[in-house]
Amino acid sequence: MTKVKIAILASGSGSNAESILKWAANSDVAEVVCVLSDKRKALVLERAKNNNVPALAVSKKKNEDRTYFEQRMIANLEGYRPDWIVLAGFMKLLGPHFLKAYDKKIINIHPSLLPLFPGIDGYGDAYRANVAESGCTIHYVNAGMDTGEIIAQKKFALISGESFEELKERGLAIENKFYPEVLEKLFKDML
Ligand code: GRF
């Protein structure tokens, strides 16, 4: 059976990327063809190499136009022919050029129950707002900041007395389990 080919884009530690790599290594529906980071020293690139997946670093040059930067990302990805782009802590907003190249084929995970708390600090915003529950959202990517169509959400209650670091760690562990589960179901339904 032909598997769905995924490219992961990530900027940081890559715990979600790691869980996707581990899942895909044993999945009948998907394979990770490469991991691309805009940060040369990102731990996620080491994780890719350790999982025997090509690791690509494409960083944005100073004053480089976003279209050129995205063109370089696309050129690097092209050789691996990904069907889907999976964002896992990729910290740049994607522009029209990249969105067009992978039209409606880009997925992201966000650390809040969207539409609540979009932006870079979902858990922090939820923690400071003292809400009863937080969670994560897996969604399609459009030109907005975390505004694309929602695919799935996972809620969890905030624990009284919990520190922000504890909340974030707990949230991330939930994300790491949830992201591969949702991808497996999504791609299975497409085959
Ligand atoms: C996660 O909280 C994810 O939801 C957000 O960025 C974080 C990335 O963490 N988009 P990691 O690099 O996967 O550990």
Image (cartoon, rainbow, N blue to C red):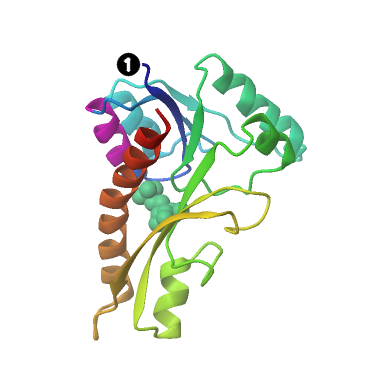
Q: Is residue 12 magenta?
A: no
Q: In the displayed structure, would residue 108 be above or below residue 1?
A: below
Query: Chief secondary structure of the magenta span?
Result: helix
Left or right of residue 118, residue 190 in this image? left
Spot occupied by residue 189 in the image (x, y as percentages of width and height): 38, 36
The answer to which of 13 and 71 lies nearer the viewer is 71
Residue visible at 37% across and 16% down in the picture? 2
Q: Position of residue 120 (x, y in %)?
A: 53, 62
Q: Identify the residue shown where x is 51% and y is 72%.
A: 116
Provide residue 29's location: percent of width, then percent of height: 32, 27
Badge 1 density bin: few <14, some 14–19, many ≥20, Cα 10 Å: few
Give the magenta-colored segment's residue range: 17-26
Disc 1 is placed on an element classified as: loop
Residue found 32% across the figure and 16% down from its top: 1
Q: Is residue 21 magenta?
A: yes
Q: Vertical placement of 122 versus 97: above or below?
A: below
